[in-house]
Image: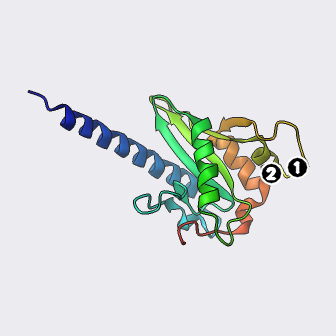
Amino acid sequence: MVDPLNVASKRGARSRTYGHDFERLIVRMLKKRFAHYPWAEQLRRSDQTHHAHLPDVAGLPGIWPELQTGQSCTPEVKLEQAENDINCAWREGSEGVSAVVIYRRKRSRDVRVAMRISVLLKLLRINGIVPGALCMIEMSFTDFCEMYARSGMPDRGCVDTETS
């Protein structure tokens, strides 16, 4: 007879491994794209074991990445989670950090990035109050990396999001 608890446990372990693999992939992609910046080698998966309020990837200046991969991704929910985590984990030097969600749906190679319009405006260096700035927008991971590179944020250096 099949033990339903054992089956559920194996399914959960597979899901966590799938998520960890996606985090490793994103770290590799970021390191490759931003290799010429001194902080690129510091990019890593965060230790989520003891600190629930950490970004999934640490070391990206000015950005708090929350990652998700799976059958039914919910970038809106993950974006709210990242914003709440920023507020809970706020510390000296982390002001101005912007939340983004990097996600990929199962069986797809298309990596997407979701963020508030206000974050997009920050990346584009557009100041001022814009109606609808709290609405969510999404784009390809490649487009996000290009905008991020041109925004001047990478030049700020690394804020260590793993220290208390």
Asked whether residue 122 is in view, the answer is yes
Which residue occupies the extreme right position in the image? 128
132 on left or right of 109: right
Q: CA distance from mark 2 to mark 1?
A: 6 Å
Query: Residue drawn at (69%, 59%), measured in percent from left and top?
Result: 97
**Callouts 2 and 1 close, C-beta under 8 Å:** yes
| Relative image position of residue 80 (x, y in whole percent) | 62, 44
45 on left or right of 128: left
139 on left or right of 161: right
Residue 61 falls in image quadrant: bottom right
Is 32 drawn above or below residue 161 in the view shown? above
107 on left or right of 122: left
- For the C terminus, the quadrant is bottom right
Image disc number at residue 34: none
Is 3 drawn above or below residue 162 in the view shown? above
Q: Amino acid at mark 2?
A: Lys
Helix, strand or loop status at disc 1? loop
Q: Which residue is mark 1?
A: 126
Q: Which residue is mark 2?
A: 122
Helix, strand or loop status at disc 2? helix
